[in-house]
Amino acid sequence: MTSRSPAAQEYHKLYRTAIWKQLRKAQLAREPLCHLCSEVGSVTAADTVDHVKPHRGDQALFFDPANLASLCASCHSRHKQREENGRKIVRYGADGYPI
C-alpha cells in the first residue's frame, strides 16, 4: 500500500464526517447501479461513491452532490483510478467491441 501525502491524509478525514456518510447513502439510493457498467449494458450494484471531478481537498467539490457518481468497486479500482493517473482506459461493450 502506498502512503498518502500529508495533504491527502488531511482531506481523507472528510470521508469520516457525518455529512459525507449522508451524501454517500443518498447517492447510492438515488443511483443504485454502477454508472460505468450501465454504459456498457451490464447491471451491477454500486457500492462506491466516486467524485466525478477529483476534489483534492476542495470541500465545495467534495460535498457537491452533482459531483458524485455511483460505481461498483471493480470499476472504481480499475477504470477510475487509471483515468486519474493519466492512463488510457479502453472499455468494451456487451458485444465485445471497444466503446
Image (cartoon, rainbow, N blue to C red):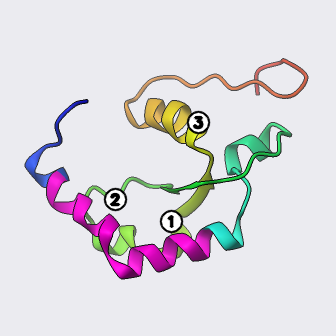
Element marked by disc 3? helix
Tag nearer the camera, 1 or 3: 3
Secondary structure found at label 1: helix
Please give the name of the residue rendered at 52% of the width and 23% of the height, measured from the top-left corner: 88
Q: Picture coordinates of residue 63 (x, y %)?
A: 40, 74
The circle drawn on residue 74 is 3
Q: Is residue 50 above or below residue 68?
A: above
**Magenta stretch: residue 58 in it?**
no
Q: Nearer the viewer, mark 2 or mark 3?
A: 3
Asked if the residue at tag 1 contacts the one at tag 2, i.e. Cβ–Cβ closer than 8 Å, the answer is: yes
Q: Could you say which disc has been placed on residue 67 in the image?
A: 1
Residue 14 horizontal side relative to residue 5, left or right: right
Quadrant, the N terminus: top left
Residue at the location (49% across, 35% down)? 77
CA gap between label 1 and label 3 equals 20 Å
* The C terminus - image quarter: top right
Provide the residue span drawn in magenta.
9-27
Q: Amino acid at mark 2?
A: His
Question: Where 55 falls versus 25 (above or below)?
Answer: above
Binning the other alpha carbons within 10 Å of mark 2 as few (below 14), some (14 to 19) or many (20 upward) gives: some
Q: Secondary structure at mark 2?
A: loop
User: What residue is shown at x 76% (from left), y 46% (from top)?
Assistant: 44
Which mark is first along the chain, 1 or 2? Answer: 2
**Which numbered circle lies on residue 34?**
none
Circle 2/circle 3 CB separation < 8 Å: no
- Residue type, numbered disc 3: Ser
Res. 30 image quadrant? bottom right
Residue 55 in the image: state x and y as whole percent.
34, 59
Spatial CA distance of label 2 from label 1 is 9 Å
Q: Position of residue 64 (x, y in %)?
A: 45, 74
**19 within the magenta span:** yes
Q: Is disc 1 surrounded by few (<14), some (14 to 19) or many (20+) residues within 10 Å?
A: some
